Image (tube, rainbow, N blue to C red):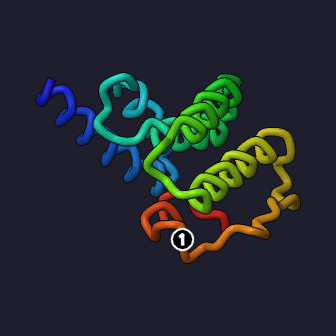
């Protein structure tokens, strides 16, 4: 179990690196190699990154993966309300991007205190 979590952690870091370098195909490969039931990282982060990568690849499963992300966000007990709303807005951004590739539409972040959203979350899932 420890080895599995270690391997998943290494794959996660590699997936983040590949996604940040816009190498979405390799990021998807790394994410697909991770077992979501034993990842050692918050499932909400796994499913948000995966749905973003799938959206960038025009993969039809992005919407279903985004639904998993929303379920994981709702189930998260270790995050505050501002972080929860921030992550939901990020998911909304992905959903909008699935249907409107022009990037002209934006999400309304009014009511979210960005100071209550951890810097790590804002950097990993940027809205602005």
- Quadrant (top left/top right/bottom left/bottom right) for the C terminus: bottom right
User: Element at badge 1?
Assistant: helix
Q: Is residue 74 rendered to the left or right of residue 24? A: right
Q: Residue at x 47, y 56 (%)?
A: 20
- Could you tell whether 117 is left or right of 113 in the image? left
Where does residue 31 sit, x and y in percent of width and height?
A: 41, 32
The image shows residue 113 at horizontal and vertical percentages of 64, 73
Residue 2 occupies quadrant: top left
In the rendered image, the residue lying farthest to the bottom is 115
* Depth order, front residue of 110/107: 110
* 103 left or right, relative to 33: right
Q: In this rendered view, identify the residue nearer to me: 20 or 67.
A: 67
User: Percent x, y for residue 59?
Assistant: 66, 28
At a point 53% along the width and 67% down the height, the residue shown is 117
Q: Residue at x 46, y 38 (%)?
A: 46
Q: Position of residue 49 (x, y in %)?
A: 52, 43
Nearer to me, 19 or 9: 9
Q: Is residue 97 left or right of residue 77?
A: right
**In the rendered picture of this protein, how many numbered marks are placed on residues?**
1
Label 1 crowding class (10 Å Cα cut-off): few <14, some 14-19, many 20+?
few
Q: Quadrant of the N terminus?
A: top left
Q: Quadrant of residue 42?
A: top left
Looking at the image, the residue that sits furthest to the left is 3
Q: Return the residue at label 1.
A: 116
- Look at 45% across and 36% down and name the residue there: 43
* Res 12 quadrant in image: top left
């Amino acid at each position: 179990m420890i080895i599995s979590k270690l391997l998943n952690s290494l794959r996660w870091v590699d997936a983040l690196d590949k996604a940040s370098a816009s190498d979405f195909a390799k990021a998807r490969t790394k994410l697909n190699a991770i077992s979501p039931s034993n990842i050692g990282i918050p499932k909400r982060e796994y499913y948000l990154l995966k749905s973003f990568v799938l959206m960038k690849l025009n993969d039809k499963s992005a919407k279903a993966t985004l639904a998993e992300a929303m379920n994981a966000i709702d189930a998260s007990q270790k995050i505050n309300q501002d972080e929860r709303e921030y992550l939901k807005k990020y998911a909304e951004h992905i959903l909008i991007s699935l249907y409107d590739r022009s990037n002209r539409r934006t999400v309304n972040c009014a009511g979210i205190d960005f100071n209550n959203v951890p810097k790590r979350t804002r950097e990993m899932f940027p809205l602005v």
